């Protein structure tokens, strides 16, 4: 593959166009990470981002009136606890952007946290929302475990807690409702017994989940993916922390990919390079692994974004439509009915599936997801923003509706041609809407990143994982000079 034909800019240039300036990445990362100037949106792009954020915000505000957030819209009353974490954070962006008042956001946040705090917990298979402070992946309309297929999920609890801690950091006033929000947030986070959820086979790694029917799942969290935020929040707990060596065990399973000239920790679907970054600013801070590689996790995600785009431009499987402004592989809906995943002879297409390409191979059925692009805006704004604008303008209301981008589309399914070619989803997924809204905001203002920099729990987790440098060094120095500071 000739990369000069695939990249309009080198990764060195792309990193210069991303947020942060030279000081954001430190001086120890090698000459290939030299920084130029930040990317500047055109007036048309700024107007588009304004509209995109407002429309995407409406998903969470309109759908979450009960305090729970539907996993998808339309037609579902099943709530995802990760979706609630995205929703809690989205309300704060809504205040900052002037979509809602601070008082309205506080009222909705308090109601949500109260539902979570009061929801029954216990080892029973029914009639509970969680156990040991963790929550089930999916809850029904009454806020209880949806069915026996819903596991007690460590990662989804972590994404929920990221929203909870964002609320705690934002609502800092001394009126009654904001004090109550901080107390409930603190109680919810402190109640999570992360140390109970060790892997059954590979302690101190964490299990992916537990159910009353089967106990702990066979799978655990190892290697690079969206699980960074899980380990960091578990390490930072003042009540039920995991063992400090868990982070080094986690990184020991990384797969380093340097085959295409942009060396990085490999993970195919882009959501794995985005989720933790929604709340944590990894620019210029390094753990021992990244210090040895002379990189950081922000740079890693930038390289992964460009590699994902390059794969789609190369289009080795010759899917319809792939190109410089039509790309983005990640976990998303697909053209097949999720209830009819059928036999292998039915063809190459899938329903919900984690699509991507990396050192582990390609998982690609021609389905493009806008969240793959939108969730990577801070990493590569010069290619992601024009792509999002093109997707909206080219496909119109087949892809873009009242809540922003619908989840996915596939121009190769079914096999036909003409103006109505292809499959377009009619669903919006909360865990795909959230990265678009929140990462666009981080690109524009750094707002969500700055909130979690205020969290002593997160900074404690980063410190225990061995992170140093950048903004973290400044925050820790300030806290060391604060009387009676407790993590």
Image (cartoon, rainbow, N blue to C red):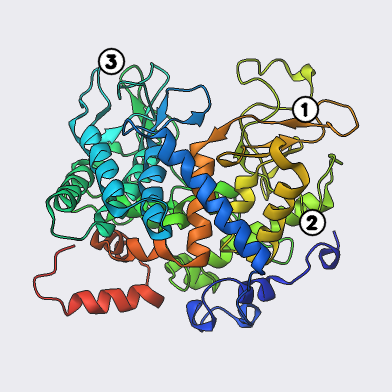
Q: Earlier in the sequence, mark 2 or mark 3?
A: 3
Report the Cα–Cα distance between label 2 and label 3: 49 Å
Q: Residue at x 39, y 60 (%)?
A: 96
Q: Earlier in the sequence, mark 1 or mark 3?
A: 3
Q: Is 198 positioned to the left or the right of 399 in the image?
A: left
| Residue 381 shows up from this direction | yes
Q: Earlier in the sequence, mark 2 or mark 1?
A: 2
Figure quadrant of residue 338: top right
Q: Residue at x 29, y 64 (%)?
A: 459
Q: Dot 3: few (<14), some (14–19), or many (≥20) neighbours within 10 Å?
A: some
Q: Secondary structure at mark 2?
A: loop
- Mark 3 highlights which residue? 126
| Residue 225 shows up from this direction | no
Considering the image in quadrants, where does the N terminus appear?
A: bottom right
- Mark 1 highlights which residue? 348
- Label drawn at residue 324: 2
Give how far across and how far down residue 284 sits, in percent: 47, 74
Q: Is 111 positioned to the left or the right of 18 in the image?
A: left
In this view, 194 is above or below 75: below
Near-viewer residue (482 or 99):
99
Give how far across and how far down residue 415 sits, in percent: 87, 26
Residue that protrudes farthest toward the left in the picture: 484
Give how far across and how far down residue 413 sits, in percent: 80, 28
């Amino acid at each position: 593959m000739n990369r000069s034909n695939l990249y309009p800019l080198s990764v060195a240039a792309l990193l210069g166009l991303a947020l942060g300036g030279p000081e954001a990445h430190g001086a120890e990362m090698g000459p290939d990470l030299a920084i130029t100037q930040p990317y500047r949106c055109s007036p048309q792009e700024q107007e588009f981002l304004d509209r995109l954020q407002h429309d995407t915000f409406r998903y969470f505000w309109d759908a979450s009136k009960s305090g729970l957030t539907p996993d998808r819209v339309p037609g579902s009353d099943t709530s995802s606890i990760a979706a609630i974490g995205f929703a809690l954070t989205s309300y704060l962006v809504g205040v900052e952007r002037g979509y809602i008042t601070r008082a309205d956001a506080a009222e909705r946040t308090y109601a949500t946290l109260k539902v979570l705090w009061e929801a029954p917990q216990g080892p029973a298979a029914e009639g509970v929302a969680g156990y040991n402070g963790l929550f089930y992946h999916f809850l029904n309309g009454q806020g209880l475990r949806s069915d026996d297929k819903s596991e007690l999920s460590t990662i989804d609890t972590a994404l929920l807690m990221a929203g909870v801690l964002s609320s705690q950091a934002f609502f800092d006033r001394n009126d009654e409702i904001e004090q109550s929000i901080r107390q409930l947030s603190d109680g919810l986070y402190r109640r999570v017994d992360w140390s109970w959820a060790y892997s059954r086979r590979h302690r101190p790694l964490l299990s992916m989940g537990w159910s009353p029917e089967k106990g702990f799942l066979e799978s655990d969290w190892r290697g690079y993916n969206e699980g960074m935020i899980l380990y960091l929040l578990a390490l930072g707990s003042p009540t039920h922390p995991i063992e400090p060596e868990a982070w080094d065990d986690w990184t020991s399973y990384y797969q380093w990919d340097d085959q295409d000239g942009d060396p990085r920790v490999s993970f195919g679907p882009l959501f794995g390079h985005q989720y933790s970054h929604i709340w944590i600013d990894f620019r210029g801070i390094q753990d021992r692994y990244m210090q040895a590689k002379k990189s950081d996790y922000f740079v890693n995600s930038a390289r992964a974004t460009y590699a994902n785009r390059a794969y789609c431009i190369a289009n080795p499987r010759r899917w319809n439509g792939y190109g410089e402004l039509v790309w983005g592989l990640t976990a998303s809906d697909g053209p097949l009915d999720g209830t009819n995943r059928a036999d292998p002879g039915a063809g190459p297409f899938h329903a919900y599936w984690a699509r991507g390409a990396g050192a582990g191979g390609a998982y690609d059925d021609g389905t493009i997801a806008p969240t793959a692009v939108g969730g990577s805006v801070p990493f590569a704004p010069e290619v992601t923003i024009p792509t999002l604008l093109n997707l909206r303008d080219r496909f119109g209301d087949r892809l873009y509706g009242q809540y922003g981008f619908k989840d996915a589309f596939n121009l190769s399914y079914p096999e036909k041609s003409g103006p109505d070619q292809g499959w377009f989803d009619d669903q919006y997924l909360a865990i795909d809407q959230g990265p678009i809204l929140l990462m666009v905001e981080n690109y524009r203002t750094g707002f969500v990143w700055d909130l979690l920099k205020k969290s002593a729990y997160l900074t404690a987790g980063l410190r225990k994982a061995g992170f140093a440098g950048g903004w973290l060094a400044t925050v820790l120095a300030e806290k060391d000079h604060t009387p009676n500071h407790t993590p």
